[in-house]
Amino acid sequence: MESDLATEKKSISDAADAVATEDLPPERKHFYNAKTKISAIFSVIFAGIALTSDGYNAGIIGNMNLLFADLFPSALTPTLKTRISNSFFIGEIVGMLLFGSIIDRIGRKSGVLMTTLALILGVIISAAAHGGSPEGLLWMLLVGRGLAGVGAGGEYPVCGTAAIEAADETEHVRKWRGLLIASVGDLAIDFGFVLSGLVPMIVMAAYGYGLTTVSTHGYGGIWRICLALGLVPPLCVFYFRIKMLNSTAFRNHAMKGRQINIRVLTLAAKKYWRRIIGTCACWFLYDFCSYPFGLFSSTIISQLNPNNTVMRNIALGTLINAFYLPGCLVGGLVIDKLGRRNTQALGFAVQGVLGMILGGALGPIQNHLGAFVVMYGLFLAAAEAGPGIATILIAGEVYPTALRGHLFGFSAAWGKAGAAIGTQVFIPIQDAFPSTFKGQQAVFTIGSAVSIIGAVVTMLTIPGRSIDLEEEDESWRDYLKRNGVDTSDMGEPLEASASKGIKAEIEHLG
């Protein structure tokens, strides 16, 4: 048996050298191509699983705030409540910028492992938060949430670039790139949001809670369990990430280390300035609306029904957030047909119209809870069918591989800045009006206006045609040459790429 294993390892190692000189036997070439196709598909799937953690860890705090309000009524001031929510977003901004740079400079795999470890550590600190006083506990929770945010934020450029590059590995997978990225990108994040409502309900049910239970028993254990379960997605993919390789696109077109300098970044800004404005502004406007309306759905329901139990408010908030999922699927099915720009603009516009209806007709609608839940859900679904899926896909496609991590992370950071600002001002805007009714009218009206602006910005800044990743890489390389930048060191030598690609089989064999 050991002899057979050694023989197989040697044949694979020999095949690595054969690829470099195009002498690989036909049967081995077929085997390697099949492995590449399977690897590409699984890279996309595992990127989606990892992004689920962002949705879950971002959404869970909105529901846990309902418990904290009963556990720590005096310590959980409105200001501290907002800071706890925003600490995750601020951490995400740091992670997006930091790891966007890291994955372009030292490789996709290194960034993947570091983001996973940061997320795991942050979730552990959050779930284990303690203090000499309720205030101390909440501040430790805030710190843990911030660190978890750094890891979750890093997942955006890491998973976004990995999924898009993996979906471009073979012609068969490339045809479905829009649907694949929509399904495992935004759908995964939104599934995490839905889980952030379902999990507390399941845990509360295990503690004996029903929809009509009025009690706070077990809250201390419930919130810790719910936060700790945020460890599941990153742990599920950690082994796979240890074994993963850099993509073919990265191995062919990377500009590592000192190659990415101020001059190169300045040239990128000159060439891609319109696209940078578009991806940053559209992601900012989308998250400005999407996150606060998603995070505070349970809070809005509780304001409309002050006599409801915590369990019932979480259930209704989760039902509203569940509308995210069909929105993603609809968008994924049409984005390759309508195009990225048209899909994003249409989603923004439809959300704007629905927001105006909700704001203008809130009086009669709020007296029929079922109608309000459906309208609210459609308001969120419209955004997911448009900018929800398109922002990730566009930011990953319109930039060259060499700077995809930088510019994807930069765009995503603007998105999370929008989420943080939207979350920060959401409650104060409501409270600025003399009644809850007027406050809710105001936030829906403002949300619809922001969405209409998003549709206009999309049409002005986002390319109308579909982007071929290889063509964009060659265009960037030619642009650098014309501006006197040495591109001879871009990517890895053919021998190194071939060797890394096939010798992965040796690791798989042990």
Image (cartoon, rainbow, N blue to C red):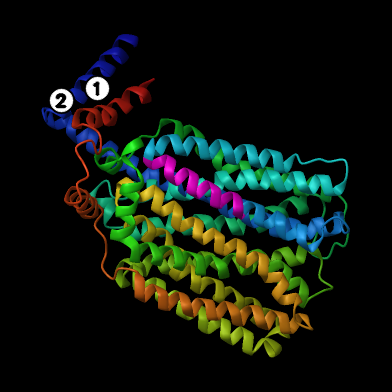
Instruction: Judge by depth and name the residue closer to the eye, 478 or 344.
Output: 478
Image point (58%, 38%), residue name: 118
Residue at the spot x=23%, y=33% of the render? 31
Q: Is residue 457 above or below residue 509?
A: below
**SS at circle 2:** helix
Q: Position of residue 239 (x, y in %)?
A: 48, 32
Which residue corresponds to mark 1? Answer: 12
Instruction: State yes or no: residue 92 in magenta.
Output: yes
Amino acid at dot 2:
Ala
Magenta residues span 89-104
Q: Is residue 358 magenta?
A: no
- In percent of width and height, residue 378 lies at 55, 76
471, 237: nearer the viewer: 471
Give the image location of residue 440, x and y in percent: 69, 79
| Picture quarter with the N terminus | top left
Q: Identify the residue at the far top of this view.
A: 3
Q: Amino acid at mark 1?
A: Ile
The residue nearer to you, when weighing 393 against 82, is: 82
Callout 1: 10 Å neighbours few (<14), some, many (20+)?
some
Residue 356, image quadrant: bottom right
Does any portion of residue 351 appear in the rendered image? yes
Pointer 2 residue? 18
Residue at 34%, 10% (x, y): give it: 2
**Viewed as shown, does residue 149 lie left or right of 369?**
left
Q: Which of pointers 2 and 1 lies earlier in the amino acid sequence?
A: 1
> Which quarter of the figure is the C terminus placed in?
top left
Callout 1 secondary element: helix
Q: Main secondary structure of the magenta part?
A: helix
